[in-house]
Image (cartoon, rainbow, N blue to C red):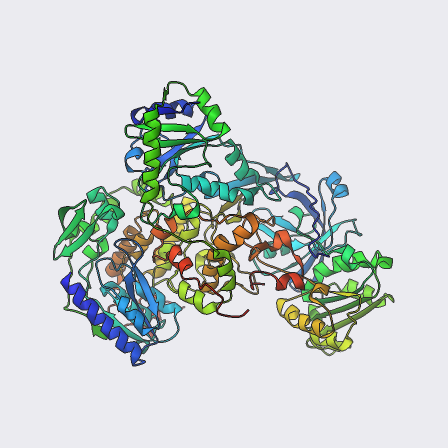
Amino acid sequence: MLKDREMEQKLRNEARTLLEQGKVDWIIGFEAGSLKFSTTPLITKDKNDTERLVINPFIVNNLADFLTGIKGRVGIVVKGCDSRSIVSLIQDNKVVREDVVILGVPCTGLIDLSKVEKLTGKYRDELDDITRQGNKVTIRVNGQKKEFPATDVLFDHCLACELPTPKEYDILLGEPSSPIANPLAQESIEKLKQMTPEQRWGAWEKELSRCIRCYACRNVCPACFCQRCFVEETEPQWVFPAPRWQDNLMFQIIRNIHVAGRCTDCGECERACPVNIPLRSLTREMYDIVDELFQFKAGMDKDAPPLLTHYEEEEAEGIFR
Amino acid sequence: MANKKINKKDIAKLLNKWSQEFAVFVPSRESGVAEMAKWDGKDTGFLDWYRNTIVPPKANFLPQMEEMFRFQKDKEGYKIELPPDGAKQLIFGIRPCDARAMAIIDPNFKELYQDPYYLSRRNSAVLVGLGCMNPSESCFCTSMGVSPAESKDVDLMLTDIGDEFLIEEVSDKGRKLMAKTTGLKGATKNDEAKAKEAKKTAYDKVTRKLDTEGIADKLQASFDDEEFWEKIAAKCISCGICTLLCPTCYCFDINDELVRQQGTRFRNWDSCGFPVYTKMPMENPRAEKWRRVRQKVCHKFEFYPMNFDVIACTGCGRCIRLCPVNLDITQVLESVPAKARVRK
Amino acid sequence: MTATDTKHQRFFAQNNVYLPHIAVIEKIIEETPGVRTFHFNFKDKKLQKEFSFESGQFGEYSVFGIGEAPFCISSSPTHRHHLEFVVQKVGRVTNALHRLGVGAEIGFRGPYGNSFPLDFLKGKNLVFVGGGIGLAPLRSLIWNVIDNRKKYKNIDIVYGARTPADLCFQYDLDAWGKDKSIKFVTTVDRGDESWKGKVGVVPKILEEIAPSAKNAVAIVCGPPIMIRFTFPVLTKLGFTPEQMLTTLEKRMKCGIGKCGRCNIGNIYVCRDGPVFSYAQIKNFVSSEY
């Protein structure tokens, strides 16, 4: 946690300086949320607000999501996965590199409060404290301390993360961190892969039957930046607007195909879902399929062309007759 | 008439008895999310984990997706048919905040034209309230005129007094149900005292507060303050979570489905947070996000009270807990300027 | 006086406000490319005889399997041989309506909303200002007034569209042009080779005609931008906000004030409108009109 405090102070100074010197119009980062163990996006033009910036194991949001909706130059706080989202947006010509000052946070993984709740059998607001020291996490409940291996409480997508430290940045706020690469990350996906198609169909029917079509999964995703989403189209009506499970599934499948090559497995879709649908099982599988078919991982090289919306002239030869 | 009580171990028996007359709904996590689900006949494990559902009980009266009617075309033309009536529901374990929410949205479905789907469910249902002994940090029901363990909006009210629940009859419907329900013990004076104590403890556990004094006037004064609303709305991502899962939100959409010559007209939940909610072919009065956030806040705390004399919020805290960016309505309302900063 | 005189005529099918009655399309008139008038009657002859409505009210029209959309009843209550509504082809339901032919069955729910306050208009000079397809709600009132001519004083009608091809209801325009008891002017924003009439946007032409505000009421229906520029002209001519009426339009679904969509602040256009006076609009708690 000490590293977090140092990074925090450096971040606050840098952010304040960027605004003072007029190098950016906005600072987008995290500040303390209104609930225990929560943070909330801080989007401000006021240099005094930078005092509220935080770095801790709960900075879940992918702030790149706000870049396509904001006008002006932005100083933005990003973890490894988020920085890849920015690179992906640059590849798509949605963000101009010179308009962002990337404040990179070397991430050691974020704590999944639902995993904590399952392990402790308590709701998050019944816990006194959650602290991380290296590969251990200490949770204090009713004065008593319980220790867990960090890999038990970190998000699956953090366990699977390939780039915890931003590769593309302007200011790196701390020492680079290494990937955790824990096989636990793929457990839920492996379970699905071992099912027969009928079993898998039944499993997804159960999951998607509780979808309420809030579109939080779409809206937290930086890769979803369409002005008008296909699901809002009425002519033709691609997907029925009511939450019938088959239509909910169609929405997920089409959305995954639309973001293929842009999804960086930041896990926000699954984290944001209010009814606990394991969306990352779909997105990560798509991510792996893209890697397998095209040897491409989203957001690794800002000068590379985007995967599915670019072709070289030679590739078209023989296709058009 | 003295109150009755029931041992927690006997709840299953009670629910089974009631299942003979009603479709009984209890808090359940079977579907993968905490919601009111049809009771399976045996499991009362919810008594251990239940704080509140994520999907509010409004889903039992205004379903997420609901058949309005079916239509069929034959050689004589179109015929319209209503769906069959559903079974009478008994919602076991509804919290006072959610029960109050139903009472708050009732006028919308009654006024001017009666909504037959909502009202038939509402009128035939029995609400068995369960006092909330462990309010969450996001709850602010006490600031909205709701007590966590007391309710006038249910038919029966249960209070946790240790190994047993005290059962209070609140409405005529509740009295009628209790008259039919045998095998319950009478509550002692000690039980009543324990219940009173438990209610007070629960009330004091709600620490989040919101001052709604003059909020409608303040919102009216700041309606055109674009700068204020842009700031508030900056981190909103325009999903529908705070509205779809709010027990006092009721906006719905109507859509038709057709398979060859027959089909169904459905209604389903909708949200003023969605960009296309007010979209017309030539213009969209709420294309900008800050206008939609303003609409949501003002509807609940200004417009609805203007029409129905009650704030459309019961402090259940779901919007605060579930918002992906932790946009907190209590913080929003506290930051509304005391006086207008801009002229219309 | 109130511009929200509301009489709730309820014609429920199967005692359920959401169920449409079956209606049959009897005639289709192509007003302009993209705008059609539909004449229809209820399949139930008893309902056909008993049904009544007032000028300004609207119905919810269904293409079964595609959806439902609100359109004003554009025929006058004084012409009860059939009912009419006007549709511009802009989206899912309207495109589906335009694909229907004579004899097709549609659904109808209504009449909903409030109506033009005839008591308030009685004995007054009436100035009708219409733009494009906005003439649809107006024509119901205009024919209503003409059919009860003695109840009203002077009638001025100013109607315009972007181009001559966009003028709707040519049969009405011909009839009103011939009616000696009406002062009738058409205008277009841009003329063509055959256009002999006035050229200029409706607010400008209205300013030229300069009808007197004394004992007068102006009823304005058209695209929002036309209304926005017409109200200041009327104000200049001495009309008070109570003397200006209009119809507002918002996206609607249920049409009966339940689904929440069409609100402007605490009022619902489907339930408290669509007819409003400018005085009421100025007092809305929301500026979203």
Q: Residue at x 29, y 81 (%)?
A: A21
Quadrant into which the N terminus of chain A falls: bottom left
The answer to which of C102 and C203 lies nearer the viewer is: C203
Tell me where residue A272 appears, x and y as whole percent.
Answer: 33, 54
Note whether residue A295 is visible. Answer: no
Quadrant into which the C terminus of chain A falls: bottom left
Q: Residue at x 32, y 47 (%)?
A: A276
Residue B96 lies left or right of residue C217; in this view the side is left
Above or below, C25 against A265 in this view is: above
For this orientation, the residue located farthest to the bottom is A21
Above or below, B241 against A223 in this view is: above
Tell me where residue C270 appears, x and y as whole percent.
Answer: 62, 53
Residue A5 lies left or right of residue C84; in this view the side is left
Above or below, C52 against A33 in this view is: above
Quarter location, residue A144:
top left
The answer to which of B132 and B270 lies nearer the viewer is: B132
Residue C254 lies left or right of residue B313; in this view the side is right
Note whether residue B251 is visible. Answer: yes
The answer to which of C46 and A239 lies nearer the viewer is: C46
Tell me where residue B59 appears, x and y as whole percent.
Answer: 44, 41
Q: How many marks?
A: 0
Above or below, C255 against C150 in this view is: above
Tell me where residue A118 appears, x and y as whole percent.
Answer: 23, 44
